[in-house]
Amino acid sequence: MAEHAELIRLGGADIVQPDAPRIGGITPFLKVMALAEHRNLQLAPHFAMEIHVHLAAACPMAPWVEHFEWLDPLFVEHLEIRDGLMHLSARPGLGVTISEQARAWTVAEFQVGEPPSGGGR
């Protein structure tokens, strides 16, 4: 988030493109959104459209949201795009469910600790 704040403070962008997962989540995104709005800058969320479509809907300075069809296999539901606009679903939360294909790429838990014995560095 600090990088976006500095970019905005220095007047380094006309359009700010924060990515909520990369800057720490929804709360830091909302802070960047407020800074952009204060400076009258447009905001075009980057990448994770399933999250950003909701955040952009709350921002009067967000003229568009990126869309990547190649991410469709990650979710059971898909964003509705009609007449060039993304429409928010009435489903709870972000309105998407992780697909079985995406679940196969994840692990339930992961323990960080000592490297296995006998391994060199």
Image (cartoon, rainbow, N blue to C red):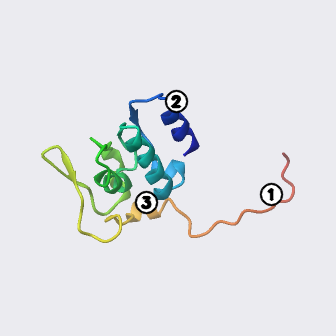
SS class, disc 1: loop
The residues tagged by marks 1 and 2 sit, at their Cα atoms, a distance apart of 44 Å
Say whether residue 34 is left or right of residue 67.
Answer: right
Q: Quick check: marks 2 and 3 in contact, CB under 8 Å?
A: no
Residue at 51 percent of width and 34 percent of height = 9
Considering every residue shown, the one lying at the far left of the view is 83
Toward the viewer: 67 or 119? 67
Image vertical order of residue 41 relative to residue 49, above or below = above
Question: Which residue position holds label 1?
Answer: 115
SS class, disc 2: loop
Residue at 56 percent of width and 65 percent of height = 107
Task: Please state which amino acid type lies under the numbered disc 1.
Answer: Pro
Circle 1 packing at 10 Å, graded few (<14), some (14-19), many (20+), is: few
Task: Please state which amino acid type lies under the numbered disc 3.
Answer: Ala
Residue at 47 percent of width and 51 percent of height = 31
The residues tagged by marks 3 and 1 sit, at their Cα atoms, a distance apart of 28 Å
Say whether residue 23 is left or right of residue 90.
Answer: right
Considering every residue shown, the one lying at the far front of the view is 38
SS class, disc 3: helix
Measuring from the top left, give residue 121's x and y in whole percent.
84, 45
Question: Which residue position holds label 2?
Answer: 10
Question: Which residue position holds label 3?
Answer: 102
Which numbered disc flags the more N-terminal residue, 3 or 1?
3
Task: Please state which amino acid type lies under the numbered disc 2.
Answer: Leu
Say whether residue 6 is left or right of residue 91.
Answer: right
